[in-house]
Image (tube, rainbow, N blue to C red):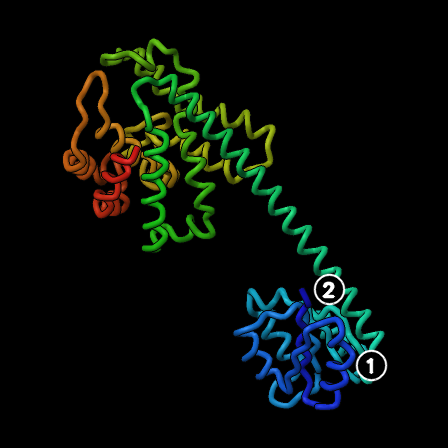
Amino acid sequence: MQKTIFVVDDNDTNLSMAKEALRAHYRVLTMPSATKMFALLEKITPDLILLDIEMPEMDGFEALQALKNDEEQAKIPVIFLTSMTDVSVEVRGFELGVIDFVTKPFSAPVLNNRIKTHLGIDEMIRERTLHLQEKTQQLQNLKSAIIFGFADLVENRDKNTGGHVERTAAYIELLTKVMIERGLYAEELKDLDMDLFVSSARLHDVGKIAISDTILNKPGKLTDEEFVTMKSHTTEGEMAIDQIATRSDDKEFLHNARLFAGSHHERWDGRGYPRGLAGDQIPLQGRIMAIADVYDALVSERPYKKAFTTEQAVDIITEGSGTQFEAAIVDLFIELKDQFEMVRQKY
């Protein structure tokens, strides 16, 4: 398939010469001004632009700057066609992002060779970028598979919490998306990688791997001593993630996972565990997960209790607003209660 070249010059002779020199190898579209070029860019994306510098209305520098300010158009390689030979012109052009200069009057062989070279480089960069993206996606898929496997391993040991990991992850995504939409904790959630954030939440109970089956699957109420052991799954989770961190450079993912694991049983009033943190001392990950985790526990059947309805769970969480849970996040949860119920039914 022929590559498309835009030639932008206010001189009709230059446009004709460029078209004649290139048409045997490329689809050539000529324009007498940058304004015409931008109008055509709304319909066609060329593989390369030959751009004159000295033009009325909008000169080549201004046109190049406008191209670079657009996320998609910035990817189009631009070569300046110019009779200007001042070094300062070249410096300015390269600073703005031009890839080369061709001096007018140009020869057809030189013009063709320059274009062929730069299109070849651009093609190679695109191929390598695509290859890197594919490799990155493969690594991401592998990491997700490991996370799912690790979370399933923990959940399969805990016979009382089937589907808990997937439900809480879905609840986390619901709450966090609305928080971003409303600008709640905008600074903390700025540039958040939602997939990474939600995926890391699946490891919030990873510390249960260190809890004995006798306690983990006890059908009745735990003794005080057993409850102390059960509470240690928060710090055990942190330690497990720290062990992974020493062998990995994925700091953002592991940072989120550690905070989910270590703080999801803290309470807004400071009466939670393992550290008795209060208010904003509790990481945001823990404050969000606290609601997701408790809601799921309430609406799920256990050997020692029947499942509560969503309305009953909402009432209980609402009563804990400002004491067990952060009030602002509880308010969002109440708005989303029907979607929480849909997630519960799905899983």
Left or right for 89, reference 141? right
The Cα atoms of the two marked residues, 2 and 1, are separated by: 19 Å
Question: Tag on residue 325?
Answer: none
Label 2: which residue? 119
Of 106 and 298, nearer the camera is 106
Residue ID at (46%, 32%): 258
Is residue 49 shown to the viewer in this render?
Answer: yes
Residue ID at (73%, 68%): 99
Secondary structure beneath label 2: helix
Label 1: which residue? 106
Secondary structure beneath label 1: loop
Q: Name the quadrant containing residue 121.
A: bottom right
- Vertical position of residue 283 compared to residue 234: above or below: below
- Quarter holding the N terminus? bottom right
Q: How many labels does the image show?
A: 2
Left or right for 223, reference 183? left
Residue ID at (18%, 39%): 318
Q: Are marks 2 and 1 in contact (CB under 8 Å)?
A: no
Residue 133: x %, y % from top left: 60, 47
Residue 346: x %, y % from top left: 28, 36
